[in-house]
Amino acid sequence: MKRFIMFILSIIIFVSLTGCSSGSTTQRSSVNIEDESKDYTDSLKIDLDKDFENLALCFDVRISDGDLNWRVLSPKGEVVQQGKIQSGESYRERLYFSPRPGRWVVEVDGNEIAGKVEMEWIVSK
């Protein structure tokens, strides 16, 4: 019984320590447009300081109607990546960027779309 208690305490301490040291941050946006097609515009922003080492953008998009355009803007306002998802297409991807300090933005713009759009910024130290 004493070994079991020590084992449980060890796991609790390990999980506590690793959770605190991860330095991970996320920003997320999610929408389901199911009833009828509609115009959709959204942006997701994340502010980075110089301490962040990793920057990723996760997309999970399924469009059943319409077209969705997306673009990623660096802190300097430059388009660093862009794309278009057309009716009937799915796009599930994790994109990686060199994490320059400042505000990063992903913008999406769709005309008469139906489907699911999920975006998530993930940064870590």
Image (cartoon, rainbow, N blue to C red):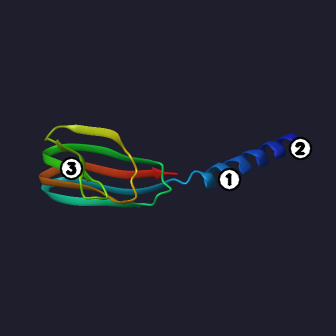
> Label 1: which residue?
16
Gap in angstroms between the C-alphas marked 1 and 2:
21 Å
Q: Which mark is residue 2?
A: 2
Which quarter of the figure has residue 27?
bottom left
Among the two numbered marks 1 and 3 on one chain, the one whose residue lies closer to the N terminus:
1
Query: At 19% from the left edge and 37% from the top edge, which residue is drawn?
Result: 89
Residue situated in front as seen by the camera: 23 or 68: 23
Density class for disc 1 (Cα within 10 Å; few <14, some 14-19, many ≥20) is few
Density class for disc 3 (Cα within 10 Å; few <14, some 14-19, many ≥20) is some
Looking at the picture, how far across and down is residue 46, in whole percent? 37, 60
Q: Which amino acid does label 2 sit on?
A: Lys
For this orientation, the residue located farthest to the right is 2
Label 3's element? strand
Q: Is residue 54 left or right of residue 10?
A: left
Looking at the picture, how far across and down is residue 93, in whole percent? 32, 39
> Label 3: which residue?
70
Kindly tell me whether residue 1 is visible in this rendering.
no
Image marks 2 and 3: residues in contact by CB distance under 8 Å: no
Q: Which amino acid does label 1 sit on?
A: Ser
Q: In which quarter of the image is the N terminus?
A: top right
For discs 2 and 3, the disc positioned in front in the rendered view = 3
Residue situated in front as seen by the camera: 13 or 125: 125
Query: At 45% from the left edge and 60% from the top edge, which residue is drawn?
Result: 49
Gap in angstroms between the C-alphas marked 2 and 3:
57 Å
